[in-house]
Image (cartoon, rainbow, N blue to C red):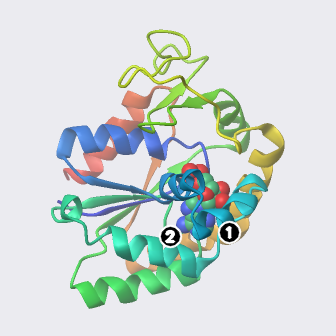
Amino acid sequence: MKNIIFLAPPAAGKGTLSEMLVEKYGYGHISTGDLLREEVKAGTPLGKEAEGLMKAGKYVPDDLIIKLISNRITKPDCENGYILDGFPRTLPQAEKYDELLKELGKDLGVVIFIEIDKQMAIERACSRITCPKCGRIFNKYSNEMKPKVEGVCDDCGTELTQRADDNEETFIKRFDEYMEKTMPLYDYYKEKGVLETIKAHSSKYDTFNEAVAILEK
Ligand code: AMP
């Protein structure tokens, strides 16, 4: 299986798409946002450093992120292929990741860019609710993405919460941070010839089908 990097603005649906691809193909799933939220919850020194930045919609320093990633991609669930959901997000991260791959003798795989406009992303983020225990993502106003029982995770029964950074004010900062720091990666990967583009459709199944077509061509 080809490793996947999702390059997408916040709330484009990379978390949901990752869940669907993990279920279909058995990929390892690495979300740097989830890893950071776990560190914050556990109150580790890394979590303490990251918390304020995340709440302000700012990126966490590259060296901390690289440390998280290098520990994670060598785990057994990543042996046959993994999805990077939220990494790399800056050019220095992408360059460090290239070095890491070389050291480990692994392939970059495919980079999938998910196109979404800012207004649609804001609406999604403000109605997104997530499971603080298993990380599953729901949406209050989407028939497809609503939990079966209001406010409760379908998978583990935990009460759903809204992420601290899923409000309009912080979301706009996150989106702007993405445009400034992450969009340059589009050209970086295009030049390498590994970039593919899909659209964030209102139905997650349409987006999923586009991704599957790329992985199976
Ligand atoms: P996400 O769950 O991917 O939306 O990430 C939530 C927040 O975690 C981001 O807004 C950043 O503050 C931080 N974060 C996640 N991944 C990275 C990364 N690769 N580089 C820097 N900060 C990150």
Specify the quadrant of the image occupied by residue 84: bottom left
Q: What residue is shown with label 2?
A: 88
Q: Which residue is drawn at 48% across and 21% down?
A: 145
Ligand 1: image quarter: bottom right
Secondary structure of residue under mark 1: helix
* Amino acid beneath label 1: Glu
Q: Which of marks 2 and 1 is nearer the N terminus?
A: 1
Q: How far apart are marks 2 and 1 (CA)?
A: 19 Å
Position above or below: 145 against 54: above
Farthest top residue in view: 149
The spot of residue 88 in percent (x, y) is: 50, 70
Task: Kindly report which numbered mark, 2 or 1, lies closer to the viewer in this rendering.
Answer: 1
Position above or below: 53 against 150: below
Q: Residue at x 67, y 43 (%)?
A: 117
Judge the density around disc 1: few (<14), some (14-19), many (≥20) Cα neighbours within 10 Å: some
- Image check: 158 left or right of 70? right
Specify the quadrant of the image occupied by residue 70: bottom left
* Amino acid beneath label 2: Pro
